Amino acid sequence: MNEKGAMTSYDHDDPSLRTGDGGLTIWVLQKMAQEKRFNELDNLFNNGLTINALPVGYAAGTAARVFDTDNKVITDALDYLTGRNWRGKVFFTSNDKRVSEGRNRMKESLVRSHSPIVPMSKFTTRLLDNHPLAPGVPSNLVILNYADLRTRPYVQERVLSMVPVYDVQVAVRGQYGPIFIGKTWLGKYDKQGEFTASHPDRLIAWYFLDFNAEALSEQRENHWDGSDEELLEPIPHVDN
């Protein structure tokens, strides 16, 4: 049996993944990224957990830009979208626990400060055993593909379609349960929806997701601006 096959496969509700007070939260991880503690984040990413299914439901999210692109307009646009207007993601339920899709929780308007948070910028997601953008990572990984991201004529979606990105994330133990540490690359999609990174060795951002109810409550209580949110209830289902 290979090293990956020998690893324990964890369920999202496994109590051993909940570290309790003092454990990692997405806000602690965001602070690490803002302080440029990238070696520590890489160490966490490279020693993630193998999970037995994609997460499902709403996730609180934070992000941190890590470098400036050659184009200041692109840099500022991505920073504005993820830093001020993004609140996390929602993953749909699915017949196949390794394949699904979802939406980003983003402000509907870029000019109204208390614009509601709505689901937009769709993606497909897969649980993979390995990926070329994360060579040597022993755990399995979750990828998010934005080849066909538009849902409605949102400005944010038009901007993101002009700066194609791709996400790879791994699960780690967190205060409330498993949390996901993600890396984002800039690149391009071909006609089949396959992504090629412009610089595989260069990230444009780190992002962090927590699907646990306690994290969503903490986000509402301590990291919110009073905006309403348009929720998808029930969570949509994907027939694979």
Image (spheres, rainbow, N blue to C red):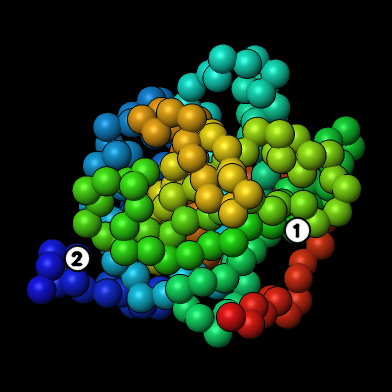
**Front disc: 2 or 1:** 2
103 or 226, nearer to the observer = 103
Q: Residue at x 88, y 33 (%)?
A: 111
Q: Marks 2 and 1, Cα distance to the nearest angstrom?
A: 35 Å
Mark nearer the N terminus (2 vs 1): 2
Task: Tell me the element at label 2.
Answer: helix
The answer to whether 196 is drawn above or below residue 60 in the figure is: above
128 or 56, nearer to the observer = 128
Task: Tell me the element at label 1.
Answer: strand
Residue 15 occupies quadrant:
bottom left
Which residue position holds label 1?
Answer: 119
71 or 19, nearer to the observer = 71
Q: Amino acid at mark 2?
A: Lys
Q: Is residue 144 left or right of residue 233?
A: left
Q: Amino acid at mark 1?
A: Pro
Quarter of the image containing the N terminus? bottom left
Which residue position holds label 2?
Answer: 4
Q: Residue at x 70, y 76 (%)?
A: 236
Residue 172 at least partly seen: no
185 or 105, nearer to the observer = 185
Q: Residues within 10 Å of mark 2 (few under 14, many from 20)?
A: some
The answer to whether 239 is drawn above or below residue 40 in the figure is: below
- Residue 185: where, in percent of width, then height? 49, 37
